Image (cartoon, rainbow, N blue to C red):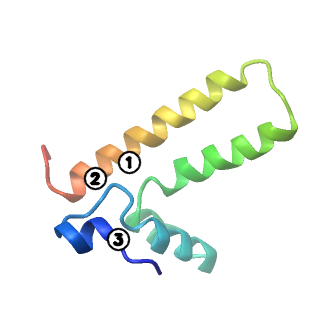
């Protein structure tokens, strides 16, 4: 696994810390552990799958769906980071 440069240089987790380990856990079939490692892994996977699918098939409201998935993903990343760093919660 690649080390997190932000954590190595500054000693603070970044917004993506845990994503690689979470992806590895999904590949091993440990879905609950992957969620606990990085809660934003599932919205991110849904977004990537939808973008890949939308590359081949067009929908009438595809941009709205992509925007909604992007917002959900970003909010999940930020909220889980705040919870992990014990900011505001």
Residue plotted at (18% across, 57% down) = 85
Q: Are marks 1 and 2 in contact (CB under 8 Å)?
A: yes
Give the residue number, with chain letter if any, for mark 3.
Answer: 4
How far apart in space, not on screen, are marks 1 and 3 (Cα)? 16 Å
Q: 83 or 13, which lies in front?
A: 13
Is 10 located above or below residue 73 in the figure?
A: below
Residue plotted at (45% across, 63% down) = 35
Which residue sits furthest top? 60
- Closer mark to the observer between disc 1 and disc 3: 3
Give the residue number, with chain letter if any, for mark 1.
Answer: 77
On residue 41, the disc is none
Which residue sits furthest right? 56
**Side of 6 relative to 51 (left or right):** left
Is 47 located above or below residue 1 in the figure?
A: above
Residue plotted at (47% across, 81% down) = 1
Residue 57 falls in image quadrant: top right
Is 51 located above or below residue 19 in the figure?
A: above
Residue 67 falls in image quadrant: top right
SS state under label 1: helix
Nearest to N terminus: mark 1 or mark 3: 3
Mark 3 crowd level (few <14, some 14–19, many ≥20, 10 Å Cα): some
Residue 16 falls in image quadrant: bottom left
Mark 2 crowd level (few <14, some 14–19, many ≥20, 10 Å Cα): many
Please state the horizontal and vertical placement of residue 55, each as a whole percent of the image: 80, 39
Q: How many marks?
A: 3
Residue plotted at (61% across, 76% down) = 29
On residue 81, the disc is 2
SS state under label 3: loop
């Amino acid at each position: 696994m690649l080390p997190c440069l932000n954590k190595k240089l500054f000693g603070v987790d970044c917004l993506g810390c845990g994503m690689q380990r979470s992806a590895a856990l999904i590949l091993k079939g440990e879905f609950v552990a992957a969620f606990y490692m990085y809660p934003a892994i599932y919205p991110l996977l849904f977004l990537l799958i939808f973008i890949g699918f939308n590359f081949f098939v067009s929908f009438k409201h595809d941009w709205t769906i992509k925007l909604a998935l992007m917002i959900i993903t970003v909010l999940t990343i930020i909220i889980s980071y705040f919870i992990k760093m014990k900011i505001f919660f």
